[in-house]
Amino acid sequence: MTITVVVLTYDSEETLDACLDSLAGQSTLPAEIIVVDDDSTDRTLDITAAFAAHSPVPVRVLRNGSHNISRGRNIGLAAATTPIVAFIDSDAWADPGWIAGLADAFAVHPEAAVIGGGVDTDHATAFARAIAINDGAVRAAATTGSLLVAGCNLAVHRDRAGGAGFDERWVYAEDIEYAHRIRHWAIAPSARVRHASRATPRRYLRQMYLYGLWKARYTLHTGHVRLVDWSASAALLGTPVLALLLGPWWLLAYPAFCAAETLVVAVFRRPAPWLLPLMFLGWLVKNTGWGIGMLAGLGRGAVREPRTPVPAGTAG
């Protein structure tokens, strides 16, 4: 099976070299690489041009310009010349057998229109290493469900998907919404990429807020409720209520909740002891951002259906 790889970029100069080099080093090369750029202002396009000059496969650059991930994915889907399109983020890099693993998965699962590959976390700072341990434990615990399909390592068989594209009303959680809507998906654990964790608490807080915001919308949109998704919001709201009713010592309930998560992960992942405080900070940041995001998603009336039609990524 021949595969087109689509890389979405926006000011990606720090990580794009490693991403593109990993594609050139595949045991099974892609038919082409399409870089969909969202009006980068750094050296992203220069790096892409330099890579294209010596790439073993054709490289095309297309413009998004909408700051909409779903729109970028649809541009890549429509432009691809192969039935299968694989997506990788510009801050991720693929194992040498990534493309071969995706192709094998489509052959093994002839009903699957979407394949989600395995994701390992990478880290540039000590904080990023700590949250990589936390997030890795969460991903390892998620053995079923469309949450295993991540946009940084996702492949679409356009014919089997009936030409369906990503819903451009979704700025985040578009990968989960797509897998839920298509329904026919499978997992390829051997098709692995490494994805960079956020390097600072501030960046991680913003990421988790946006994830929570759009996860609330996904929950309301699909009716698929997981109680664990609301645990951080419950802890955020419940702690001050308990403190008001039972005494100020109950304000410690929220950090205790984060500490308990840290200890559970530590038991199973056995990190270096010096990482434990950073892992606790990671849970504190994640729960705060995610919890507030989920509540904001409810407060914004996410239950209302947007009126924009779902676009189709044309299958060629």
Image (spheres, rainbow, N blue to C red):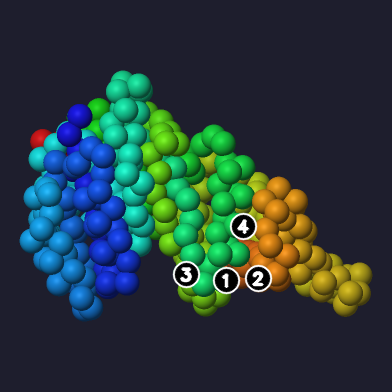
**Residue type (three-letter) at the residue carrying disc 1:** Phe
Residue 269 spot, x, y in % from top left:
67, 51
Instruction: Give the label on residue 134, or none.
Output: 4
User: What crowding class fits label 2: few (fewer than 14 Cα within 10 Å), some (14-19), or many (20 or more)?
Assistant: some
Quarter of the picture holding the N terminus: top left
Query: Mark 3 vs mark 2: which is more N-terminal?
Result: 3
Which mark sits nearer the N-terminus, 2 or 4? 4
Q: Residues within 10 Å of mark 4 (few under 14, many from 20)?
A: many
- Mark 1 burial class by Cα count in 10 Å: few <14, some 14-19, many 20+: many
Q: Residue at x 67, y 58 (%)?
A: 271
The Cα atoms of the two marked residues, 3 and 4, are separated by 15 Å
The picture places residue 117, in percent across and down from the top left corner, at: 40, 40
- Provide residue 78's location: percent of width, then percent of height: 14, 46
Residue tagged by mark 1?
127
Mark 3 or mark 1, whichever is nearer to me: 3
- Separation (CA) of disc 1 from disc 4: 11 Å
CB atoms at circles 2 and 1 under 8 Å apart?
yes
Amino acid type indicated by mark 3? Ala
Looking at the image, which is closer to me, 190 or 286?
Answer: 190
In the visual, does 259 lie left or right of 38? right
The amino acid marked with disc number 4 is Asn
